[in-house]
């Protein structure tokens, strides 16, 4: 019963995975989505971010990834993070960008600007360049004591 409860509480909204024809491959990232509310539940957002960090750490370890992408959506705001295993055994999670999407069609023209396009292009480029399995024996496996 405890194992089933653990699986229910540790699930995510979205998974980024590589596909090869009809086979699902390596998980490269994860995401959480929360609806906008009149009052922000910071505890729930922090709890979701912690769960995403655990999923990213596990994906980096299991799939021997250089990095894993995490994103958290709250209402119209999205924040992107990158998780990496450093050479000293420390996992580093770094915010790499954030964007607020328009709520109405009238705000769309203001959204399409150079800053937002650069952020989206940078996140896309970082994902395709860094969220890949490490080639050869370059992957450092942490020792769990």
Image (cartoon, rainbow, N blue to C red):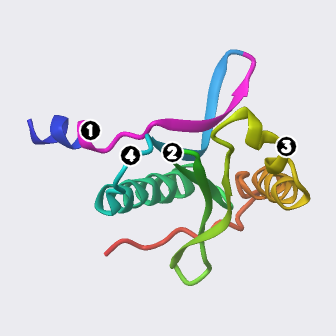
Q: Where is residue 75 in the image (x, y as percent from the top left)?
A: 51, 45
Q: Could you tell which of marks 1 and 2 lies nearer the N-terminus?
A: 1
Viewer-side label of 1, 4: 4
Q: Do the residues labelled 4 and 2 touch (CB within 8 Å)?
A: yes
On residue 109, which mark appears?
3
Element at label 3 = helix
Q: Can residue 64 be seen here?
A: no
Q: Name the residue under label 2.
A: 75
Which of marks 1 and 3 precedes in the sequence?
Answer: 1
Q: Tell which tag, 3 or 1, sits nearer the viewer.
A: 3
Q: Residues within 10 Å of mark 2 (few under 14, many from 20)?
A: some
From the viewer's side, name the closer residue of 98 and 64: 98
- Is 11 a magenta residue? yes
Q: Position of residue 109 (x, y in %)?
A: 85, 43
Q: Distance between the residues labelled 3 and 1?
A: 43 Å
Mark 4: secondary structure: loop
Q: In the image, is residue 119 above or below residue 17?
A: below
Report, in whole angstroms, how far the alpha carbon at label 2 lies from the one at label 3.
19 Å
| Secondary structure category for the residue under label 1 | helix
Q: Is 59 placed above or below 7 here?
A: below
Name the N-terminal-most of marks 1 and 4: 1
Specify few, some or many for label 4: CA neighbours under 10 Å numbering under 14, 14-19, or 20 or more. few
Q: What element carries label 2?
A: loop
Write the residue at 62% across / 80% down. Answer: 87
* C-alpha distance separating marks 1 and 2: 26 Å
Q: What stretch is highlighted in magenta?
A: 7-21
The residue located at (71%, 53%) in the rendering is: 131
């Amino acid at each position: 019963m405890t194992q089933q409860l653990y699986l229910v509480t540790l699930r995510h909204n979205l998974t980024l995975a590589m596909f090869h024809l009809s086979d699902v491959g390596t998980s490269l990232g994860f995401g959480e989505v929360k609806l906008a509310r009149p009052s922000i539940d910071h505890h729930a957002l922090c709890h979701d971010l912690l769960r995403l960090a655990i999923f990213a750490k596990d994906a980096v370890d299991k799939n021997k990834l250089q990095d894993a992408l995490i994103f958290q959506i709250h209402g119209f705001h999205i924040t992107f993070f990158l998780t990496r295993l450093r050479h000293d055994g420390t996992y580093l999670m770094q915010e790499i960008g954030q964007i607020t999407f328009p709520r109405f069609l009238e705000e769309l023209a203001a959204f399409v600007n150079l800053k937002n396009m650069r952020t989206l292009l940078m996140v896309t480029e970082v994902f395709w360049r860094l969220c890949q399995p490490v080639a050869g024996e370059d992957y450092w496996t942490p020792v769990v004591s």
